[in-house]
Image: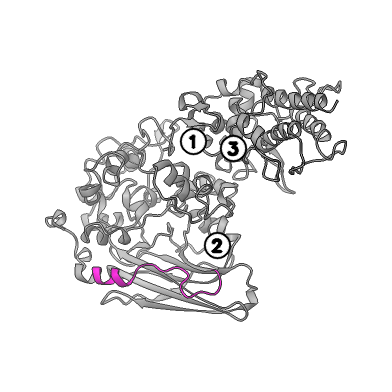
Amino acid sequence: MLLFSKMKFPLAHTIAISLVVLMIAVCAPIVNAQTTLAAQLISRPVTNDDINGLKLPATVERSGGLNTVGLGQAAYLEADVDISVPASQIAGVKWTIASQPSGSKAVLEDSPLGSNVPVYLPSDRLIYQVAARKLFRPDVSGIYNINATITTSGSGVATVSMMITGSTYVGISACSQCHANGAAGTPFSMVNAWSKTAHSQIFTNSINGQGAIVNGKPYPYTSECWGCHTVGFDTGAADPNGGFNTVMVQSGWVAPTDLVAGNFAAMPKALQNVSNIQCENCHGPGSNHVVTGGDPRLISTTYTAGTCVQCHAEAPFHIKSMEWGNSAHAITTTDPAGNAACVGCHTNNGFVDRIKGVGPADLSYDAIGCQTCHEPHGETNPSTNLHLVRTLATVTLANGTKVTSKAAGAGTLCMNCHQARVDAATYVPKTAGSTYFGPHEGPQADMLMGTNGFTYGQDIPSSAHREVVADTCVACHTQTPASTDPALGQVGGHTFKMSFPGTSTIPAEQMVGACQTCHGSDITTFNFPLLDYDGDGVIDGVQTEVQHLLNNLALLLPPVGQAKTDITIDATWTQPQLEAAYNYRFVQRDGSLGVHNVAYTVGLLKASIENLQKSSK
């Protein structure tokens, strides 16, 4: 506490510490308390895409879905229940404010989010449905505990609870008191790393005329941008809370008409303190966190996508959220949750802990999201890492092959998980056949690098993609469609999808732009012809040729002679069959049908076919 003894805060900051500590002791967040069915209570993020796309009232404010909320600002509470419960059986939801600070008159109000507003997270939509919603605005600094009891006529009762901390904004000067003085790589050094990121300068540069340039002039920079580029800017907030617009009114500052150098320096210091994208944009207002000496329960620290998409979701300009929502990452399977060997790739929190070297593993489930791949504080060389990629460290594949960022660029990040996870040379001879036999799903890193197939001792050549595509995976899979593209949000970008099959209203599309760089502008499909790899006398597209080789290999695997689109491996398979089966699975699970590395793909399949033909004689 002595660290903050000389700090000056507005009256709203000066909550009695003894009261806060007492409330902390009895008001820790509770999820699914006394429940007989799956349920949850969340603060739902609300984005510009929600407001515009779902035609919500103009008065609806954006929200990151944090449980640390500025005084007077909106928390969109949502009680969700198991999707398997018939809607007709949801008898009702009883809402109560179990506790709130002395003097608070805050109440639960009707939510402006209509029935057309879905559960936010794509992964949650597979599990939950909305039972009821409420709007809540804290009015006094302190802790609020809110309960929702969901009653069904046939599936039981669930009481779900959450803690909301109503706070005021303190700005970067207060955060720097603790978080700029520690050892690098710790939470106490994050301000130093953040200060080198684009987030830390976005408002400063823009107000000084150094932001986006359109037709040779700085793009108009108005309050429409400040909701994301400053701390706590929310004209819909019912109470003064120390945010940018509150301080702006108090200081009498008027935005300059000309965007020129020196504008930021001329602003009141108190307003500079809550400018740019900083700690409280993502963690919520920090007054209670500060006055309690840094109690972590009084600040939001979450990996959920809402933290980022409260700003990165306004199509057709900010489209990362829309793209991610249509990706496989957003609905990563829940099966590996609870398994320490799996969560390091299959869950958001598991991967982050793995990269940080934190243990024991967090076994809970959270789908792959923004912060899985991006480290928002800028601790991964922010001066050279524009997109704040979480790690660019060298990746070692299961057979010992090392892939550096110098070789694979930003794609090194992807290779942490998209790999075979077994060493083919030792795995294949020692592993009995079963339905689980083969490389792990998604061995794209091994395929691209031309390694870890079962080679029969041969030198299998590789294609040039690994040498000529600077950022490997990222260069191709995150190509950005034009803002006018009918398939915007369905392909490319953070969908990571290279193709879109099309609908009745949107034509099919393949993201071949990266291919055209080397293969020519006349390339319109990944399946363009190169050679007659399958030896049938016809030069088909490369993917067709590879599929023919897979089909030919399948004919030689049990049941031998039967055409099949997949194989089922069991303990009766011979060693030659298992060797070939590994390569079948390797190519099949790579998923590109040769595009990642056509020479290595074709070489492995041909070697497998040749070896099986020899062993059957």
Highlighted magenta segment, given as a residue range: 20-38
Q: Quadrant where the C terminus lies?
A: top right
Task: Describe residue 138's horizontal placement relative to residue 489 as left or right.
Answer: left
Residue of label 1? 413
Res 295 → quadrant: bottom left
Residue at image x 21%, y 58%? 293
Residue type at tag 2: Val
x and y, in percent, of residue 181 in the image: 21, 43
Q: Front-most of 586 and 68?
A: 586
Q: Give how far apart the Cα atoms at labels 1 and 3 are.
A: 22 Å
N-terminal of the two: label 1 or label 3? Answer: 1
N-terminal of the two: label 2 or label 1? Answer: 2
Give the mark toward the camera: 3 or 2.
2
Residue type at tag 3: Pro
Tell me: residue 201, above or below residue 526: below
Q: Quadrant where the N terminus lies?
A: bottom left
Tag 3, which secondary structure?
Answer: loop
Residue of label 3? 481
Residue type at tag 1: Leu
Label 2 crowd (10 A; few <14 / some 14-19 / many >=20): some
Callout 1–callout 3 Cβ contact below 8 Å: no
N-terminal of the two: label 3 or label 2? Answer: 2
SS majority, magenta: loop
Tag 1, which secondary structure?
Answer: helix
Residue of label 2? 119
